[in-house]
Amino acid sequence: MKRFLSKELLILYLIILIGAFLRLQGVFTNSFAFTYDVGRDMLALWNIVYAHKIPLIGATTGLPGVFYGPWWYYMLSIPFLMSSGNPQGIALTMSFIGILAIIAAFIVGKKAGGIFLGFCFSALIAASPVLISLSSQIWNPNIAPLFVILIIFVLGKIYSFKKENQKYYFLLGLLLALNIDFEIIFGLFLSLGVIISLIWIKYKKISLKSIAFLLLGSFVIFAPRAIFELRHQFLMTKSFITFITGGNFSHSISSVLEALINRLNIFFNLFNSTLAVENKILGLTFLIFILITLFIFYRGAEKSIKNLLKTSFVVIATFLIGTVFFSHDIWPHYLVGIPVFYIFIFSCCFYFIYKRFSCFLIPLIVLIIFLVNLNPIFIIQNLKKPLWEGDASVYRNQLGVIDYVYKEANGKEFKYVVYTPPVYDFTYQYLFKWYGPKKYKYSPTQKVNIAYFIIEPDLGYPDRPKWWLEAREKDGKIIKEQKIEGGIIIQTRVVK
């Protein structure tokens, strides 16, 4: 019993509890986003679990003809089945993944440098606003931080063994390939950075057998895609080659310099969002602190931590250089795991100072940074406010649409028509497929004269809903119109 109630573990439990609260509150109030992407994924999971259609690829990416891998769907099929198709169960899974990242960070930090580094790494992971937001939204790139932490753990094992242990190379191959499966651009740059650092650090000690196990681990993850490619005449390979050779990378010096300034700004803003509550002065102070600390203490650090820091900087540099020559816009999910490396480097700096001076002020400073990112005053103020209404993408509001329609129908058959800014109404397709029949025991049909027109607000293009309604002005007579939470309008119409 004493083992589970030691002072160190009680601190860890507190960190986990705070991190869990920040990640779970939206799940229990159904305040998480239920968007086009989530609705599409829920329909795909329905087909896997109930129609037994096992896909070889996942959803489309931003690159034409290139798809995500299917492992996101494979992984979510278990919580989907356990929650009987409830999206809340998937949102809960995302939060649990975020909580696991806190625990994994403690283990990685403790293995690398001891209890203090474990506390620093896990506490800053728990309180980082960027990582909290990732754990609060159902989307495949958002689970990358946990897998980045696991990669750091595996690399720590590889770097610490004098004699090679092939199982860790196999695990590394699995983890790198999974990141490519979850977010292609992020996964490719991450893999490139890790492999460059691995060659740099272990270039004289990597055997062909270890390389074979690394490739084998990757092949396990890529196998479904490989089968798809063979069946479809290498569709994705051709599309990716077309993208690479299609002028999507900057070449001129002026464009490269312009891109470099833009990318440095993006990386600095991400650093601020991760550790400095978007305060540029505080963020710049933290960067100066990191540079000075590493200049003074890096040379005397343990070899294992030095190697992990080398990897962290190589990965960040790979992303920076790679995106400089990448002429497309840099979306946040392209850098989704970079905050983990920021936090690990920052934590190591505090660890170096604490190890050298053993001063109580160092844990106090870490605690202050933890609280600054946590912003407890803001949290307490929000707890006293009424439940946040949100917009049309909030899951609770979309459930309200389904409940309203069924209550208005009062047991009679009906059909529905939806205007939604993403065009495809995957969210309503899923809710009318799962939630409506489960609660009200029947589904919509198309062969009736009562229709419910569901119109979501389009904040980016406010005239589009008006044009949509004008085009459907003769589609039945409006007998009732109601505006519900999220600004969603529902018209009851009698149609021919």
Image (cartoon, rainbow, N blue to C red):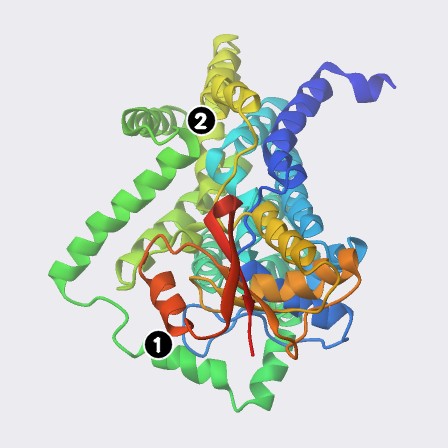
Give the labeled residue for mark 1. Answer: 243
For residue 477, side relative to residue 316 (left or right): right
Give the labeled residue for mark 2. Answer: 349
In terms of depth relative to the viewer, which is nearer, 354 or 247? 247
The residue positioned 64% from the left and 64% from the top of the image is: 430
Q: Is mark 2 on a helix, strand or loop?
A: helix
The residue positioned 45% from the left and 41% from the top of the image is: 339
Residue 379 visible? The answer is yes
Q: On the rendered image, what quadrant is the N terminus found in? A: top right
63 vs 364: above or below:
below
Mark 1 and mark 2: Cα distance apart in space:
40 Å
Q: Where is residue 361 in the image (x, y as percent from the top left)?
A: 48, 9
The kind of residue tagged 2 is: Cys
Q: In which quarter of the image is residue 451?
A: bottom right
In terms of depth relative to the viewer, which is nearer, 430 or 159? 430
Q: What element carries label 1?
A: helix
Q: Residues within 10 Å of mark 1 (few under 14, many from 20)?
A: some
In terms of depth relative to the viewer, which is nearer, 454 or 428? 454
The kind of residue tagged 1 is: Phe
Q: On the rendered image, what quadrant is the C terminus found in? A: bottom right
Q: In which quarter of the image is residue 342?
A: top left
318 vs 429: above or below:
above
* Residue situated furthest left in the rendering: 254
Residue 110 visible? The answer is no
220 vs 39: above or below:
below
Q: Where is residue 305 in the image (x, y as percent from the top left)?
A: 52, 36
For residue 376, side relative to residue 219 (left or right): left
The residue positioned 50% from the left and 24% from the top of the image is: 374
Q: Where is residue 299 in the image (x, y as percent from the top left)?
A: 41, 30
